[in-house]
Amino acid sequence: MMNVISRIITGTILIILGIILMFFSFKESGWILIYGIPSILIGFFILFNKKEDKIESRKDVKGGKRNV
């Protein structure tokens, strides 16, 4: 549950930051779009990434003892 909350908070902050940067890029200069567009894309990826919660089993461990 905590992972979902942190994912929502982080994704939303990045999306809002990207929108603000895009707004200022149209008023000031276009090079700020270099930071605005990727932050929006990363924010959406973090917000909608559900595969992060799954834990895969290891294939190299077959059972009992570990070889060190």
Image: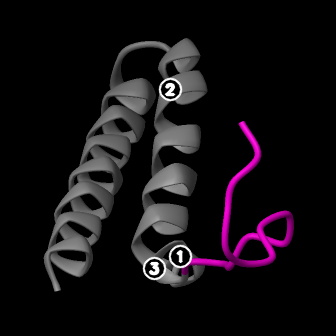
Of 57 and 45, which appears nearest the observer?
Answer: 57
**CA distance separating discs 2 and 1:** 21 Å
Three-letter amino acid code of the residue under disc 3:
Asp
Q: Quadrant of residue 51?
A: bottom right
Tell me which residue sits at (14%, 75%) in the image: 2
Residue beneath label 3, please? 53
- Marking on residue 35: 2
| Horizontal relation, residue 57 to residue 45: left or right | right
Callout 2–callout 1 Cβ contact below 8 Å: no
**Percent x, y of residue 58:** 74, 70
Tell me the quarter of the image containing the C terminus: top right
Q: Which residues are magenta?
A: 55-68
The local crowd at label 2, few if under 14, some if 14 to 19, many if 20 or more residues have their Cα within 10 Å, is some
- Foreground mark, 3 or 1? 3
Q: Earlier in the sequence, mark 3 or mark 2?
A: 2
Tell me which residue sits at (60%, 24%) in the image: 34
Callout 3–callout 1 Cβ contact below 8 Å: no
Three-letter amino acid code of the residue under disc 1:
Asn
**Percent x, y of residue 23:** 33, 40
Q: Residue furthest front?
A: 65
Residue beneath label 1, please? 49
**Percent x, y of residue 60:** 85, 63
Give above or below for 59 relative to 24: below
The local crowd at label 3, few if under 14, some if 14 to 19, many if 20 or more residues have their Cα within 10 Å, is few
